[in-house]
Image (tube, rainbow, N blue to C red):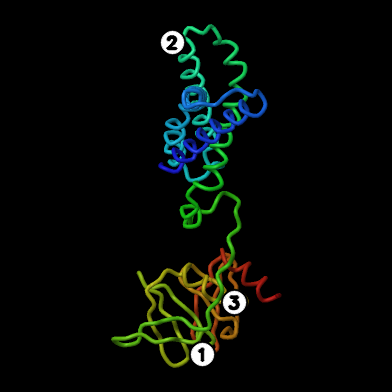
Amino acid sequence: MVAPMVGWGLYLVALTCYCLVYKQVLLSSPVSWAVAWNTLGWACREWGAWLILTPVALRFLRRYNHASDKSVEPWLGVAMLLVVALVIRISLDLMAKTGDEIASLVILFPRYLVASLVVLLVWRFYLCPKAVRRTSTTPDAGEVTAPEQCPESILVNKGSGQTLLPIEQIQWLSASGNYVEVHCEEASYLVRSTMQQLQRKLPADSFLRIHRSYIVNREAISQITGRSSGGGEVLLKNGQTLALSKKYRRELQQFKLQ
């Protein structure tokens, strides 16, 4: 993390220049190299620890993809940053035996708190890895995913090759192991897919699941026969009869009304 160190280095230089200008203009104090060096030493004593602590804190925060996903850890990192910075600063006062430890704590705490929040905001809006968020494929609980757009055709196996089959030509589909068998009026084709994956590609206003192994085109249905057990049969216009499970019978009846 070179950028935070460079940023804090520039801040220390700017703070030193500001103090020198303040002494020269408002206090009319003569400015010399000794004064400039002492002022830089004061700036480093006040904020120098942040030059090292900020990259460490950002490396800690970098482990998390979202501030909202694990809200405790980023705030914990910022709290640790604040405490360590204050401990270092108070320790310098103790080593120098200035007797200003309490005054330093009262004065520096709000300043260091603001600096800690700035570090968190910089990470959250500029350094938090957005690519990971974009590639996340697991929806949150209750999240509604956008439906897939239905293509005009699907790629099916034909002989030793493949071909594009217009969806409007499909009459019904059946599960066949790791494949789905796509039936048209004149031929049948295989697609390596699951029924659920293939159903998402079909227009919902034309195709309906009638069984865990069957999906039917509404235009291909000739007759629906129910049974007392709750299931039934679906007769297609080409004479093919397919089983209708109890689970999907009500959906098919609602589909007919629509």
Residue at (59, 64) in percent of width and height: 146
State the residue position of label 1.
238
Residue 225 numbered mark, or none: 3
Label 3: which secondary element? strand
- Mark 2: few, some, or many residues within 10 Å (few <14, many ≥20)? few
Label 2: which secondary element? helix
Mark 1 to mark 3 CA distance (whole Å) = 16 Å
- Image location of residue 56, percent across then percent down: 42, 34
The amino acid type, in three-letter code, at marker 3 is Thr
191 in relation to 10, above or below: below
Q: Earlier in the sequence, mark 2 or mark 1?
A: 2
191 or 51: nearer the eye?
A: 51
What is the quadrant of the N terminus in the image?
top left
Looking at the image, residue 205 sits to the left or right of residue 69; the answer is right
- Image location of residue 16, percent across then percent down: 53, 30
Q: Quadrant of residue 235?
A: bottom right
Residue at (55, 43) in percent of width and height: 124
119 in relation to 84, above or below: below
What is the quadrant of the C terminus in the image?
bottom right
Q: Quadrant of residue 60?
A: top left
Residue at (54, 11) in percent of width and height: 101
Q: Quadrant of residue 117?
A: top right
Label 1: which secondary element? loop
154 in relation to 67, above or below: below
The residue mark sitting in front, 1 or 3, is: 1
Mark 2 to mark 1 CA distance (whole Å) = 95 Å
Please identify the residue farthest to the bottom as the structure is shown. Answer: 186
State the residue position of label 2.
95
Q: Earlier in the sequence, mark 1 or mark 3?
A: 3
- Mark 3: few, some, or many residues within 10 Å (few <14, many ≥20)? few
